[in-house]
Image (cartoon, coloured by chain):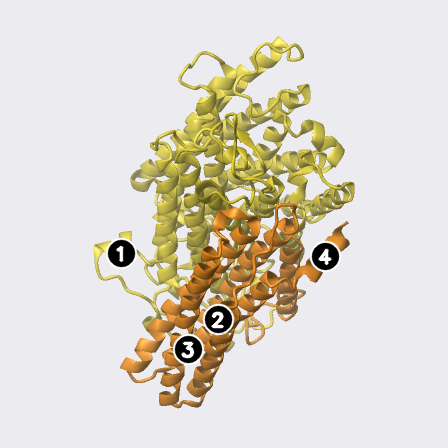
Amino acid sequence: MSVMLLFLAAIAAIIIWWIAQQRLTSRPWLEVGHLGQPGGGERSPVPAVKVGLYVFLAVVGALFSLFISAYLMRVGTPDWWSTPIPRLLWLNTAILIVSSAAMQWAKTEAERGRDDPMRTALLAALATAILFLTGQVFAWRELTEAGYVLADNPANSFFYVITGMHGLHILGGLVALGRTTVKAWSAPVSRRLRLSVDLCAVYWHFMLAVWLILFALFAGWANDFADLCRELLT
Amino acid sequence: MVDIRSDASQAIPPAEVEDAELYHPKSWWTKYVFSQDAKIIAIQYSMTATAIGMVALVLSWLMRLQLGFPGTFDFIDADHYYQFITMHGMIMVIYLLTALFLGGFGNYLIPLMVGARDMVFPYANMLSYWLYLLAVLVLAAGFFAPGGPTGAGWTLYPPQAILSGTPGGKDWGILLMLFSLILFIIGFTMGGLNYVVTVLQGRARGMTLMRMPLTIWGIFTATIMALLAFPALFVAAVMMLFDRLLGTSFFMPAIVEMGEQLQQGGGSPILFQHLFWFFGHPEVYIVALPAFGIVSDLISTHARKNIFGYRMMVWAIVIIGALSFIVWAHHMYVSGMNPKFGFFFATTTLIIAVPTAIKVYNWVLTLWRGDIHLSLPMLFALAFIVTFVNGGLTGLFLGNVVVDVPLSDTMFVVAHFHMVMGVAPILVIFGAIYHWYPKVTGRMLNEAMGQIHFWVTFLGAYLIFFPMHYLGLLGIPRRYHELGETAFIPESAHTLNAFISVMALTVGAAQILFLFNLVWSLKKGREAGGNPWRATTLEWQTPQTPPAHGNWGKELPVVYRWAYDYSVPGAAEDFIPQNQPGLGRPTREAAS
């Protein structure tokens, strides 16, 4: 569970940083009439949906941290044979990076108010994300055809379950991104839409980061880290 | 009391109504069924939770009938008994307590108490309820599925949970349970995002974090914990589904089932336990923290005195929430672990007692020299303090490895967790319902019925669970369908068991009276008015009772003070609402 605890420590650090600005040492019983600091109840500049997204990302982060924790607790048992990394995964990783970059491009263009390049960027991000998912399915097929099926070995099981869970999250993001893209192409760009683009970009970067960590995990680069954790605990 | 701005002319004008942000229902269906109004959703949550909770109550009756009078009811065989245990535990912990505190009270109280018109994402809030309802239906479908519901125990430990020896293990039971949990978690996440973001972003002007009532602090912290803890259950459920349906070996060790070697092997049941209790322990506090918060408000309001040590109470809530994530393995002492881990987890477990004790002291000190009104909410709050202290003390026993190992599989543990996480939070729920029912319906609950309900429940719960500690110390094992003729169990233990069963039936019957009271008072109850308890918090200052859609009429409230200005010297009344600028007569133009 060391990875989950690390993740929680990061969340705790964010919470402590936030709490430190909330005047938790104030004496509310003495401060009658005083409206508090500007943030206290005023609409803060960050829109509610964005805060909601960040909280959601914390939940998703917890989910993947727990999967990784479970993986690291199971890895190295006698019945464990590592699953080879299909070469296609390298290409998929590159595609996801491109997708994330396109989202960043869309976000920058949205901030600058240039609608046409933003539309193109959105479309590029959408297309590359779909390409990534298709690529993942092909990677799965490559593995199963090579005989690495789900129930044969715990390494395979973890690989399919965790990549599948990541794929589902990308798929969910695609729904949001798809709606945003359709709206961007069909109507004049509103402030709300720019916010949607911003949110999609944040989500995309997060899912890219999760994927890079997972990829490192499956490629075995995380083994040193796992050994380190195990040494710390024993 | 330093009154910085008593001059009303300096008061900041309330924010203009933000009509565009509020969804307005267009038909009866969208108003009462597919409603996006947090108040309706809260009532839907509460009613669903109560309905499925009644099922769990009946299951506990059936278990007690079997334990008290073994052999008398032959329809309760061993398989049924285990199914009853499992469903009773799972329903009570997740589908009743969690759903009622966060989905029910959270939805109703958060927007009203922080001065918002509604939750920030009303649509997701609605989806949250419907997913919860679906989860409940899938869970209840287990009763009608071939093979019945799962009998794996509420902890669902593999490998037994998915083997044929356990009821529902190779049938539908365990599948429906896991699917239901996954649905519940997805639904809860939608609701939970709402509760957190509403507290962060939706507060009225002047409502700083340190002016929030402790109820909101409790629900807020518990929601953050639930958002981080439920994924562990989600991961465990998904992986177990794979083990059960697709033959993977996440949790399944090499095992012989019915004389047949299974394909699976090498998996780790301990891994499941880690995941399960990583959720399971915070879950205790997910239920307890809202209860702590609500009790603080009930005590302060009904003792007409400000809460003692408000800041300490807030910090204690946050610290308990944080600590509860690093104690989970104290549920696994009997699974065996490195003694150093045992020492670590015993220490963290015992450290939680410190902030918890601070809270108890502060409640008692709030009562000290207060003007205590023994109204029904106050009675339940007092009952909670005693019960919680009782349950908490036995928790200190069980937190130690050496004491836990011999007691772990006895009735002592059953008595402990029922006291601390069953009876105590339920008492708060009752107190809270007696307290807020007038706001929800505009009428008071019947006092006489309430008194009967309180005394039977409170005394009855002690008569059930106090003797159970003794049974546990005698060594009576838990989870046993029938004790049979065992040398070390004296005859008196059987008599005591029968007595406990009779009390359990009695306490259950009192709950039916309570439900009747809820329905009866809806029409026949005394008119409550807007603020029957003369309370300070915002939900009692709404222009209409029950609050209308949008909660606040034209103008949002502005908050000038904390939530506990009771018996302020020099004030015109013994309470000053949070939205009142000065000490004088309330200028509640909104309330007229």
Q: Amino acid at mark 1?
A: Lys
Q: Which of these two is toward me, B503 or B323?
A: B323
Left or right of B232, for residue B22: left
Task: Please say whether residue B131 is visible from this viewpoint.
Answer: yes
Q: Is residue B379 left or right of residue A220?
A: left
- What is the chain letter for disc 1? B
Q: Earlier in the sequence, mark 4 or mark 2?
A: 2
Estimate the x, y position of residue B421 in percent, counting from the top left. Answer: 57, 38
Q: Are marks 4 and 2 on the same chain?
A: yes
Q: Colour of chain A?
A: orange
Instruction: Examine the image and state in which quarter residue B30 appears.
Output: bottom left
The circle drawn on residue A92 is 2
Q: Residue at x 70, y 27 (%)?
A: B406
The circle drawn on residue A125 is 3
Residue identifier under label 1: B31
Tag in front: 3 or 2:
2
Image colour for chain B is yellow
Dot 3 crowding, Cα within 10 Å, few <14, some 14–19, many 20+: many
Comparing A33 with B359, the one in front is B359
* Residue position for label 4: A227
Give the label, 4 or 2, closer to the camera. Answer: 2
